[in-house]
Amino acid sequence: MAPRPQTDAFVLGVGLTPFIKPRRSREYPELGFEAGVKAMLDAQINYDDVEMGVACYCYGDTTSGQRIFYQFGMSTIPIYNTNNACATGSTGLHMARTLVRSGAADCILVIGFEQMSPGSIKSAWTDRPSPMGLSTQMMEDTRGRHDSPRNAQYFANAGREYMEKYGARAEDFAEIARISHEHSQRNPYAQFRQPYTLQDILKSPMIHAPLTKLQCSPTSDGAGAAVIVSQRFLDARPQLRGQAILIAGQTLMTDSPALYSRSAMDLVGFDMTKRAVAAAYKEAGVGPSDIAVCELHDCFSANELILLEGLGFSEPGKAHEMVRRGDITFGGKGPIINPSGGLISKGHPLGATGLAQCAELCWQLRGWANNRLVEGKVALQHNLGLGGAVVVNIYKRADGEDNRRLSDEEVVAASAFAYNPAVEARHPTAEEADRVRSRVARCEYAMGDTQEKILARL
């Protein structure tokens, strides 16, 4: 194995669009542009500082990334287009960190975006074998064949297995969703911001038992972005050290033979997550008890419950007891799970999800998320895709300090924004967009109609 690179990698800037229903009210070039502008404003850089770009999406033609990045400038930099199922956004973060730590670049812009179709997730391809074909066959062999959405079946079956082994109840999964919807009220980027009672959730339409509609993440349109930089790049900007977030541990893993063990839990990545988080904890020099806040891939409430154990937050077979005690929400023992509302209520535009998780945890550790702040100094991100891939990121403040709740006025004074982006979602102005676009390689033709759309939204 090659020697470990000596440079650290930091998240210096993040940006999000609101996550919205997939109705083509906003097209992906505009969504990606908005997220990228915000991330560069946050990092206080210009596109001329960016040495590589990573575009993350699942649904779209090849080189869709260039369509977005060319709006900032046609500077001839390498632009990578990546797809790793629902873990796509975090795969982009893994790629950027790997490149920065290897010394290949000092500043990389990662943009995750998705423009989806309404309804449950379906493959765009019908003329070739599905990468999920063997998993689907095993699921049907072990749990029967049903007409409900396939992804809901996968995770509902995993929840059923946990119920059968450890005594969890349908109410435990519903309580997870109740908490997620309650949290999302304070996230201005969330697709759904309405609270629900436990009975509301239990009585919503059954998708695949025990999962009802309000326990399932929706399809969404949206984008997120992050600027990943080296120690050298950060050292040249010491005034930004207070907002820089160290990626202290990171792992991207794929499945082991346990995938086909006939366990419904392992079929959705339980084993993969356990192995990945152990490696990330080791690299970061922390353990589960050090984590204050976690953005966990709750595509369905059942996945959150089983992964409370998979990530080491509960003893084996005791995750549902954590939920019943209220440990996973404010006022509980912790760690606090998905203060953003998670995928269930924030939304799940596949390529953007990993970047949205990253943004939330950066805002938490900076102290900017003052309406939903979790006090502490270590955060964990978990992003999973069937097929399969899982990314675990462990974040710490670059200055090593605990976070401190900042007022909106303090955020404005310390940042490049005229508002606090953690608690208010605004569209960038034409002047802000102009500030971050390349000074030497911009091309107005590459903007298409994005500029007009920006002005129309002001």
Image (cartoon, rainbow, N blue to C red):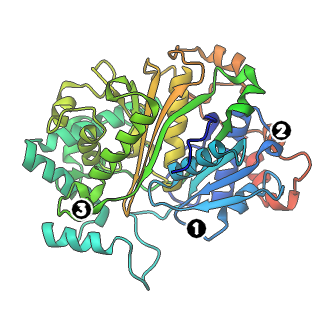
Question: Foreground residue, 193 or 163?
Answer: 163
- Residue 448 percent across, percent down from the top left: 79, 61
Label 3, label 1: how many angstroms apart (C-alpha)?
A: 26 Å
Question: Foreground residue, 257 or 50?
Answer: 257
Q: Which three-letter amino acid code belongs to the residue tagged 2?
A: Arg
Answer left or right for 434 relative to 286: right
Residue shown at the point (55%, 36%) measured from the top left: 359
Residue shown at the point (14%, 44%) measured from the top left: 170
Q: Which three-letter amino acid code belongs to the residue tagged 3?
A: Gln
Label 1, label 2: how many angstroms apart (C-alpha)?
A: 29 Å
Question: Foreground residue, 228 or 188?
Answer: 228
**Residue corresponding to mark 2:** 435
Which label's residue is closer to the chain start, 1 or 2? 1
Label 3, label 2: how many angstroms apart (C-alpha)?
A: 47 Å
Residue shown at the point (86%, 62%) measured from the top left: 445
In the image, which disc is placed on residue 362?
Answer: none
- Residue 292 percent across, percent down from the top left: 39, 24
Answer left or right for 405 relative to 234: left
Residue 258, relative to residue 334: is it above or below?
Answer: below
Residue 43 seen anywhere in this rendered image of the structure? yes
Q: Which three-letter amino acid code belongs to the residue tagged 1?
A: Gly
In the image, which disc is placed on residue 153?
Answer: 3
* Helix, strand or loop under label 1: loop
Query: Please, which residue is most extreme toward the right here?
Result: 440
- Where is residue 197, by image quadrant? top left
Which label's residue is closer to the chain start, 3 or 2? 3
* Helix, strand or loop under label 2: helix
Task: Determine whether label 3 and label 2 are within 8 Å by CB.
Answer: no
Q: Residues within 10 Å of mark 2 (few under 14, many from 20)?
A: some
Residue 195 seen anywhere in this rendered image of the structure? no
**Residue corresponding to mark 1:** 60
